Amino acid sequence: MICKRFFPVFFLMVTVIFAQVIGQGSLTQEIIDEISNSGELDSTEQVIMNALTNSRLTDLIINRDFLTKHTDYFSHTIETKGITDQERSGRCWLFAGFNVLRPKVIKKFKLADFEFSQSYLFLWDKMEKANTFLEHIIAMADRDLYDRELEIILKRPVSDGGYWSYVVNLIDKYGVVPKDVMPEAYHTRNSWVMTSILALQLRKNAIELREMAANGGSISELRKRKVDMLKVIYKMLILNMGKPPAEFAWRYKNSKGDISESKTYTPVEFYHDVVGVDIKEYIALMNYPGKEYNRLYRLENARNIWERDDPLYANLSIEKMKELTLASVLDNEPVWFACDIGQDKDSEHGILSTKILDYRGLYGLDFKMNKEDKISYWESSGNHAMVFVGVDFQNGRSVKWLVEDSHGKDRGHNGHWTMYDDWFNEFLYVVVINKKYLTAEIKAIFEQKPILLPPWDPMVLILLNNQ
């Protein structure tokens, strides 16, 4: 034991040693001077600085040679009608899901146009996420607040983001309705404030549930209180979005102008009778370099509906995913996919290609990273869902892909993107394919015991900060 009268001296010595160790890695004046002296610009670099300080970066690095060779021609396209618009919300996964189904309804009933109500399932997604959040709080009530898993749960109580499995879960449980039955509201189109207030209320609920548990409350008592909390969440949602219909009457006008008889449906009946697609026949595949291919993975604690399974993916090579996507598109089956929309794009012309922006030529640096490192070092992750609706197939291979977005006609080229094959390889992470296109070998992957990816894995966080 250190004598009390020597403690101040001992403390001072430790402080000095600690300061010396910390200082070894600091940005000293000597190092600052060395770096500053290395920053002298030659005449070419001076011109670049003048241009950069007075212009938008992306305007200066558009690859003109690539742009002049670019065309919007596709050897095969799927007929679609109209562009949807999620506006200022993170509902891309839901819009893309409906954009897979929408052409089927249009073709089936020979409609001029048709759109599902995104608001209807958006409301139920928020309700289900609120319930799942509170169930996680109850299940983890004895954990320290700085527990890594609990911390991730607390960070996103009711985020807008989602996976393909969310589309499946919601449609299977709640059905669908046409857009005019539950149209958009201000806070579905501009969801950030509403979502923030819901999160505030739910975190307050979490405090109460943890205090109840700490004071000896039983699971049944906590769940009974949870129901009262969800009543408040529901009231908040319908105040912002309107009430979801329990049943509704539907009539339609086909492209010839003929008007159908009116018929009353529940949302589940409408999905089964009118849409008539088994959404469970669609399977999610991912490309996650660094993880073993041809293996099954489950994203732990990433579901939106408490009683449903967490998202499940077969991990395949990008070449195999491309082969299956091509087979689907050529058979007029739109393909839902998740990608990193923030990378290598020319928004004005609607181009996605690793060759469209010349960062290397501007800075004289090599920015190349392989896909595994981009994921592991958080340089890239899936943050947007869209739909493939065409392909340009030349000389036995796909050259570029036609992509339908959900941000109106002002984003991309009239609401579409041209994705070149190189971009597909580098920044596409998930595709959803109908089972009928899968080989027996790929189907067998889904019979494996899944490998769990923890909530902090980069691929688990895919799409939870949607654009």
Image: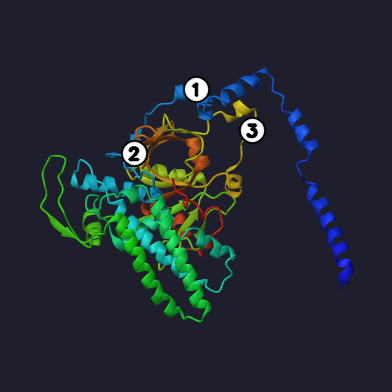
Residue count near mark 3 (Cα–Cα under 10 Å), binned few <14, some 14–19, many ≥20: few
- Label 2 sits on residue: 408
Instruction: Relative to 52, say whether 121 is above or below.
Output: below
Q: Is residue 455 visible?
A: yes
Q: Amino acid at mark 3?
A: Asp
Decide which of 157, 275 is in the foreground and name it.
Answer: 157
How many discs mark residues in the rendered view?
A: 3
Real-space Cα distance between discs 3 and 1?
20 Å
Residue at (40%, 75%) from the top-left corner?
Answer: 225
* Residue 250 % position (x, y): 16, 53
Decide which of 7, 314 is in the foreground and name it.
Answer: 7
Q: Marks 2 and 1: which is nearer the front?
A: 2
Residue count near mark 2 (Cα–Cα under 10 Å), binned few <14, some 14–19, many ≥20: some
Disc 3 and disc 1 in contact, CB within 8 angstroms: no
* Residue 411 % position (x, y): 39, 35
Disc 3 and disc 2 in contact, CB within 8 angstroms: no
Real-space Cα distance between discs 2 and 1?
27 Å
* Residue 111 % position (x, y): 19, 43
Assign a secondary structure to mark 1: helix
Mark positioned earlier in the residue sequence (3 or 2): 3
Decide which of 334, 23 is in the foreground and name it.
Answer: 23
Assign a secondary structure to mark 3: loop
Q: Is residue 73 left or right of residue 463?
A: left
* Residue 389 % position (x, y): 35, 40
Considering the image in quadrants, where does the N terminus appear?
A: bottom right
- Label 3 sits on residue: 366
